[in-house]
Amino acid sequence: MSTTTDYSEYTVTVGTDPGYYGSQCSEEDGKRIAESIADLIRSEFAGIQINMSDTGRPVTGPDSEVVEEIRIWIEDNWTAAL
C-alpha cells in the first residue's frame, strides 16, 4: 500500500501576468497558462494550495526543505504546462 503525502499546509503562488509568459501572450493566454501550471502542480503535490496572483512568495509552508523541493520541482517542470 502506497502512502500519499498531504501538501495542504503548503501554498504556491502562480502568476497570471501574461508578460511573464512572453511578449506575444494575451491576458487570456496568461490565465490559461497559469491554470495549466496550477493543474500540473496539483497533480504532483496532493492537497497543495494554489494562489493565483502576481504577488506573494512563490512557495510557502511549514518545512523549509519541502518548500525548496516544491520550488525546484516547479522550476524544472513548469514549461510542461505551456
Image (cartoon, rainbow, N blue to C red):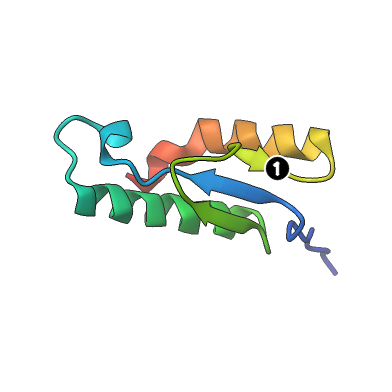
Query: Residue 38, relative to residue 66: is it above or below?
Result: below
Q: Residue furthest bottom?
A: 1
Q: Residues within 10 Å of mark 1 (few under 14, many from 20)?
A: some
Q: Where residue 49 appears, x then y in whole percent?
A: 63, 58
What x and y, as percent, mark residue 34?
Answer: 38, 50
Could you tell me which residue is drawn at 85 percent across and 69 percent down? 1
In this figure, what is the number of numbered marks? 1
For the residue pair 75 and 54, the one nearer the viewer reads as: 54
**In-image side of 39 versus 46 (left or right):** left
Which residue does the image show at 39% across and 57% down from the upper left? 35
Mark 1, residue position: 60
Which sits in the foreground, 40 or 62? Answer: 62
Q: Quadrant of the C terminus?
A: top left
Residue 23 picture location, percent across and down = 18, 30
Q: Residue at x 30, y 35 (%)?
A: 21
Nearest the eye: 19 or 65: 19
The amino acid sitting under disc 1 is Thr
Look at the numbered disc 1 and give the secondary structure of its residue.
strand
**Residue at the farthest left position:** 24
The quadrant in which residue 57 appears is top right
Residue 40 in picture, x, y percent from top left: 49, 53
Residue 43 picture quarter: bottom right
User: Residue at 73% across / 61% down in the picture?
Assistant: 8
